[in-house]
Image: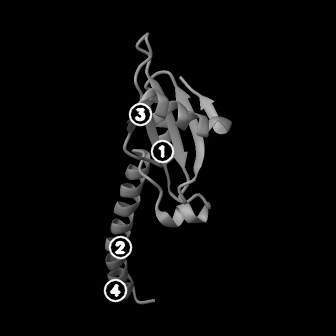
């Protein structure tokens, strides 16, 4: 072993280790803040990227809001449906923690909302 060559190699590797640690910390910060998984990790788990969408309608006579949240698989099929009689902020936070991308919210007239809701009645879950 040549100690001078080893020391030179160690000094060169320190830069690589520092860069590696920077990337690890950046990824941890991203994921901890609710960022989506890297594509390679999504495909390894068979879960592809998913999205969710908030669909609302006019409040009822008592001022209670209606919200329907749909979760879409990567291929666009609906894999979950939730209804809440409030804005359900806790459930929205839970969906974003599950690395789901929020789609733009949609506001429908009551008749359109009810038609939409009936379409997903079999998988509908109520949350508050």
Q: Residue at x 43, y 10 (%)?
A: 62
Badges 3 and 2: C-beta atoms under 8 Å apart? no
How far across and down, in percent of the image, does residue 53 sit?
Answer: 45, 42
Q: Residue at x 40, y 13 (%)?
A: 63
Q: Residue at x 53, y 37 (%)?
A: 116
Q: Secondary structure at mark 3?
A: strand
Of residue 112 and residue 76, the one placed in the foreground of this image is 112
Mark 1 vs mark 2: which is more N-terminal? 2
Residue placed under numbered mark 3 in the picture = 108
- The label number, if any, that marks residue 16 in the structure image: 2
Badges 4 and 1: C-beta atoms under 8 Å apart? no
- The label number, if any, that marks residue 4 in the structure image: 4
Real-space CA distance between mark 4 and mark 3, rounded to the nearest whole angstrom: 73 Å
Mark 4 vs mark 2: which is more N-terminal? 4
The label nearer to you, 4 versus 1, is: 1
Residue placed under numbered mark 1 in the picture = 52
Real-space CA distance between mark 3 and mark 1, rounded to the nearest whole angstrom: 17 Å
The label nearer to you, 3 versus 1, is: 3
Q: Assess disc 1: are there few (<14), some (14-19) or many (≥20) residues with their C-alpha within 10 Å of its C-alpha.
A: many
The label nearer to you, 1 versus 2, is: 1
Of residue 39 and residue 58, the one placed in the foreground of this image is 58
How far across and down, in percent of the image, does residue 87 sit?
Answer: 43, 25
Mark 3 vs mark 1: which is more N-terminal? 1
Real-space CA distance between mark 4 and mark 2, rounded to the nearest whole angstrom: 19 Å
Badges 1 and 2: C-beta atoms under 8 Å apart? no
Q: Is 63 left or right of 79, judged from the image as shown?
A: left
Residue 70 visible? The answer is yes
Q: Assess disc 4: are there few (<14), some (14-19) or many (≥20) residues with their C-alpha within 10 Å of its C-alpha.
A: few
């Amino acid at each position: 072993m040549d100690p001078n060559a080893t020391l030179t190699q160690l000094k060169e590797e320190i830069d690589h280790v520092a860069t590696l640690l920077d990337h690890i910390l950046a990824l941890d910060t991203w994921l901890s803040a609710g960022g989506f998984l890297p594509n390679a990790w999504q495909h390894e788990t068979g879960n592809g990227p998913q999205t969710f969408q908030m669909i609302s309608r006019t409040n009822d006579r008592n001022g209670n809001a209606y919200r329907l949240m749909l979760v879409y698989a990567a291929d666009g099929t609906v894999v979950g449906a939730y209804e809440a009689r409030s804005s359900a902020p806790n459930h929205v936070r839970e969906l974003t923690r599950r690395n789901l991308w929020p789609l733009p919210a949609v506001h429908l007239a009551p008749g359109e909302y009810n038609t939409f809701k009936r379409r997903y009645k079999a998988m509908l879950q109520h949350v508050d």
